[in-house]
Image (cartoon, rainbow, N blue to C red):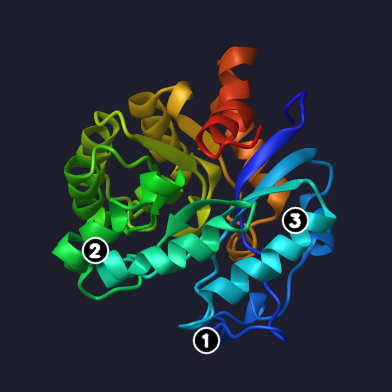
Amino acid sequence: MPEFPIIDSHVHLYDVQRLSYGWLANVPKIDRSFDLDDFDAARGPVQIEKLVFAEVAVDPGLHIDEVEFIQQMADGDPRLAGSVAHAPLEKGARVEQDLEKLATLPSVRGIRRLIETERNPAFVLEPAFLDGLRLLPKFGFTFDICVKHWALTYGIELARRCPQVSFVLDHIGKPDIKNGLRQPWWDQIAELAALPNVVCKISGVVTEADHQSWKADDVKPYVERAIEVFGFDRVMYGSDWTVSELTHRYPDWVAILDDIVSGASVDERRKLYRDTVSRVYRLG
């Protein structure tokens, strides 16, 4: 375990009695409410100083309600220091009303509009989506890119077309670890890292391996590659809890990362586990 408390950049919390999440019916293992008490039980001995909530694909029309719910949690527990909310950026200029509402909630630091669940990810390059995306700097919001490996090229193009926007790549671009594929992800992750307005979450990696028979050595090369191309100044630790519960316990991921970065300096490990996320999401 790190010798200092860490900051988790990607945690999911939800209340199925209060809000609706249709996708949870497909993952019965995590189809129930999860709050900060559940998070504390899951993290075990891992010391967490702060965490960032990541939107949970709440059913359409409930994205403001979701973040209001999270804000109530944050008001009661200062560890919940930031949140990444959903916003329908495809509305173009009209999404500014959503962003104005979100900006009234102190915890909101960024926006995520899921791309990985769309059959045609090209929608993110439509003029309206780009218009909505380019509004984010006005509110000081980042944009989380969440794509599968086969759509990473769209994330690259977004970052190129919107250089004024600060982007965060979720889950190292979800490479096809299960089938051992490296290309084109291997080259594209370097292409994305060459753009200065992008940082990368070292999160959600094990769930891209075989859920039944994964090994740490399966995920290690992909994590090493992401850290190699982005550098410690532009990577941040994330657990992707609760989704991570589908494959491993919370401390297991920290142990895997500890092994991967065992040769790094204390300063480099602090950047991975604390400093980058604090800077990018303005956690203070």
The residue positioned 48% from the left and 42% from the top of the image is: 201
Answer whether labels 3 and 2 touch (C-beta < 8 Å): no
Q: In this view, does 200 lie above or below 270?
A: below
Q: Is residue 229 left or right of residue 26?
A: left
Q: Quadrant of the C terminus?
A: top right
Q: Which of marks 3 and 1 is nearer the N terminus?
A: 1
* Neighbourhood count class around disc 2 (C-alpha, 10 Å): few under 14, some 14–19, many 20 upward: some
Residue 129, disc: 2
Q: Are marks 1 and 2 in contact (CB under 8 Å)?
A: no
Q: What residue type is labelled 2?
A: Phe
The mark that comes first in sequence, 3 or 2, is 3
SS under mark 2: helix
State whether residue 114 appears in this view: no
Q: Distance between the residues labelled 1 and 2?
A: 24 Å
Q: Where is residue 205 in the image (x, y as percent from the top left)?
A: 48, 50
138 to 149, vertically: above or below: above
Residue at image x 23%, y 44%? 162
**As shown in the figure, which amino acid type bears the numbered disc 3?**
Ala
Q: In this view, does 157 lie to the left or right of 7?
A: left
Q: Name the residue under label 3.
A: 74
Q: Position of residue 4 (x, y in %)?
A: 77, 25
Disc 1: CA contacts within 10 A as few (<14), some (14-19) or many (>=20): few
Decide if residue 152 is on the left or right side of residue 216.
left
Image location of residue 216, percent across then percent down: 54, 43
The answer to whether residue 134 of the structure is visible from this angle is yes
Residue 8: name its quadrant: top right
Q: Is mark 1 on a helix, strand or loop?
A: helix
Which marked residue is nearer to the observer: mark 1 or mark 2? 2
SS at mark 3 in the image:
helix
